[in-house]
Image: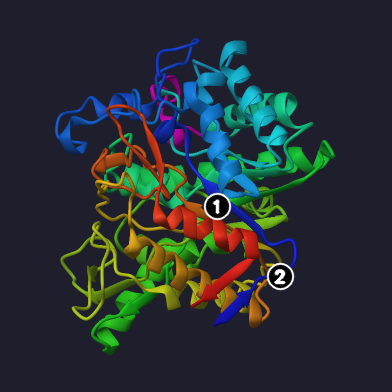
Amino acid sequence: MDIYQFPKNFLWGSATASYQVEGAVKEDGRGETIWDRYCKCPGRIKNGDTGEIACDHYHRYKEDVQLMKQLGLGSYRFSIAWSRILPEGTGKVSEEGIQFYVDLVDELLKAGIEPCVTLYHWDLPQAMQDIGGWANPKMADYFLEYSKIVFEKLGSRVRKWITLNEPYCVAFLGNFEGRQAPGIQDFSTALQVAYHLYLAHGKTVKYFRESQMAGEIGITLNLMPRHAYPKSEENEQARVWADGYLNRWFLDPLIFKRYPEDMIELYRKKQIKIPDFDKKSMEIIGQDLDFLGINYYNDQFVKRNETCWPLETEPVIPPELQVTDREWPITPDGLEEMLIRLKTEYGVKKIYITENGASFQDVVTEEHTVEDAARKEYLRKHLKAVYRAIQKGVPVKGYYVWSLLDNFEWGFGYTSRFGIIYVDFHTQERIVKASGKWFAKCIAMNGIRED
């Protein structure tokens, strides 16, 4: 029997996001969000699902915190719904809305669980989208206004803050590919969105520092190694561009205070309008971070295809790889590779894995259990990859499994289950899955046991 022991004080947690779990979309003054609006568009979401009820976490948070305590979680990462705090995105504060988060934080602390708060996880107030959304240059200041209110209400008890979750998805999936809210399909708009998101992030971190707030603040990026498949000189160019599109376009401004030149050159060649990255703005964007949060699910394999605009790259899945029910390849070695890259190429001093997990079709047995062996194996392999990276000197300080609960999985609605706790969306019953029980054992021993 081998035990892979993690460092002392390693933080074990799980994560959710406001629109995916809370429900209660019309209660206590909450304003409409872009996801409320997007879900009403026919054909956008599988089965026409919405987040109107989701996991009903808004009403059941005490029950859910008790489940977290039962699992032994050291931390719970959740996001704030901007429109619960400011229903119109700016202006009048909803005291009822913010009280939910005050009560949630109190409940977590009472259970000995550290809250980790994400300020923005995709659910922009629709009132903000009505004035241009993240493409509006004023959005950074609106976001700062909102963040200040949350800091004031929760800052005395919250010590871990994340400004943005996956700005790549907000910018490119929401404003170029159009397969997430707000459903816009314009590449220049997506670049503007990415830029303004980072200005919002930088201004918020700057305020956090100047206010001498206790705790630490960072940002969460979804990162994945890109590989040429099959290997060829032509496909290698596709890999470089694909890496620039997802990884370097979001890492380089934060760490190096610049955008990658090869991607700027490519976009200009395609006659795409690029934001004016002036030096002053890049200084704001490149604020020192206390940590970098990483969401990792899988690597991506690409080949050159000149008909795919603007990157001339096409994703492919090597036939020998296992996949999840989302058709995502299972590539645990890629997590180790990305972690090492963050240390060696980017010099990141502190990393949290803020999301890692997999979707499989779970079934409740006659014994009223959920025996999700595939998810347990996925988590085991990825935690071993984290362990190997730590052994090689990568400063990974914690790991949050995605997700605590089965939830509303964006365009996939309720057809895709990532939770270590099963949710019956008709009755709202919760069942801790076999993977959740296994994860609890990892937490208890601060490591992984190989039987």
Q: How is the image coloured?
A: rainbow
> Is residue 218 among the parts visible in the rendering?
yes
Q: Which residue is mark 2?
A: 7
Please state which of the two labelled residues, at mark 2 or mark 1, is closer to the viewer.
2
Q: Residues within 10 Å of mark 1 (few under 14, many from 20)?
A: many
Q: Nearer the viewer, residue 7 or 38?
A: 7
Q: Quadrant of residue 427?
A: top left
Q: Where 252 sits versus 98, above or below? A: below
The residue lying at 43 percent from left, 19 percent from top is: 127
- Compared across the picture, whether 61 is left or right of 344 comes to left
- Residue 232, horizontal then vertical, whole percent: 26, 89
Q: Quadrant of the N terminus?
A: bottom right
- Residue 379, horizontal then vertical, whole percent: 44, 65
- Residue 187, horizontal then vertical, whole percent: 32, 49
Asked which secondary structure carries label 1, the reply is strand
Q: Quadrant of residue 76?
A: top right
- Compared across the picture, whether 221 is left or right of 359 comes to right
User: Which numbered dot is residue 348?
Assistant: none
- Compared across the picture, whether 37 is left or right of 20 comes to left
> Is residue 258 among the parts visible in the rendering?
no
Amino acid type shown at disc 1? Thr
* Range of magenta residues: 127-138
Lower position in the chain sequence, tag 2 or tag 1 = 2
The residue lying at 61 percent from left, 13 percent from top is: 93
Q: CA distance from mark 2 to mark 1?
A: 22 Å
Q: Nearer the viewer, residue 352 or 65?
A: 65
Q: Quadrant of residue 162?
A: top right
Amino acid type shown at disc 2? Pro
Q: Which residue is mark 1?
A: 220
Do labels 2 and 1 touch, CB within 8 Å? no
